[in-house]
Image: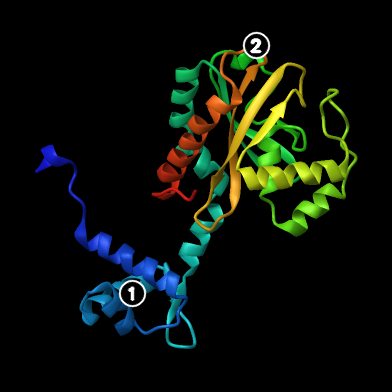
Amino acid sequence: MMRRGTPTLTSLSRSLAMLEAVIADGGARSVAALARELGVPAATAHRQIHSLVEQGYLARHGGGGHVAGPRLLALLGQLDEKQVIANAAAPVLHQLAADLGCVVQLGTLDGDMVTYRIKTGQGAGNLFTRVGMQHEAYCSGIGKVLLAHLPEDQQQTYLAGGPFPALTARTITDARALAAELHKVSEQGHAIDDGEVADGLICVAVPVHQPDGRVLAAVSISQSGAAVHPPAVLMPRLQAVAAEIERAAFGRTFR
């Protein structure tokens, strides 16, 4: 038995399935209806939900149904969605960096700035970024991906909040030109920073999608202009890695 792997607790799996069903239902249906949907006896469903209420993971509401309880809400309050993605991404990105001999990074948008959460690969120490560092979003590959996937009102607020100082002769500094660039990034599904942050530095970046469609993180490959990997060659590999991160973090891909 153990040679096949650690056995699962069937009762726990069924209780977690019931918890998920109740949360997805939002308290609209009865316990009997949820039991029918899950294919479990009504008596079993009542015991599961009673136990979840007793433990604080569910709570009864006035309509007779059940909703998330205080203990579950407290757990959710402690959850850092962005760090969950970074934790899932770390081994995948370390392998990618080793395979390509490039610097690979993962960043998130915090306020108006990109926060770098992972940085790995050959030459990582020579690149000006570091883990925990924040950098302007408008001029980097990761930043442009994250800005391109903001809700429209938030993106418009960002664009209206300039100025956008030039870091190199290639930096996009005009708000209208930046808006057009973000639209292109959204349409094509990737961003390229071709010397916009530092002369000779080329970065390609793609989004990592949440189950609900949001983009809270992006991953990039950085290399000097003399490197042997053109962006068109790197892009499919980077997109495949982003999909692998989604599977590791959420159980399936969303692209």
Which quadrant does the N terminus fall into?
A: top left
First reached walking from the N terminus: tag 1 or tag 2: 1
Q: Nearer the viewer, residue 244 or 191?
A: 191
> Vertically, is 23 above or below 141?
below
Residue 147 seen: no
Q: Nearer the viewer, residue 231 or 1?
A: 231
- Mark 1: few/some/many CA within 10 Å (<14, 14-19, 20+): many
Q: Could you tell me the amino acid type at mark 1? A: Ile
Q: Position of residue 62 (x, y in %)?
A: 49, 87
Asked whether, in this view, residue 91 is left or right of residue 144, the answer is: left
Which residue appears farthest toward the bottom when viewing the image? 63
- Mark 2: few/some/many CA within 10 Å (<14, 14-19, 20+): few
- The numbered disc on residue 49 is 1
Q: Could you tell me the amino acid type at mark 2? A: Ala
Circle 2 is placed at which residue position? 226
Asked whether, in this view, residue 233 is left or right of residue 66, the answer is: right
Snapshot quadrant of residue 203: top right
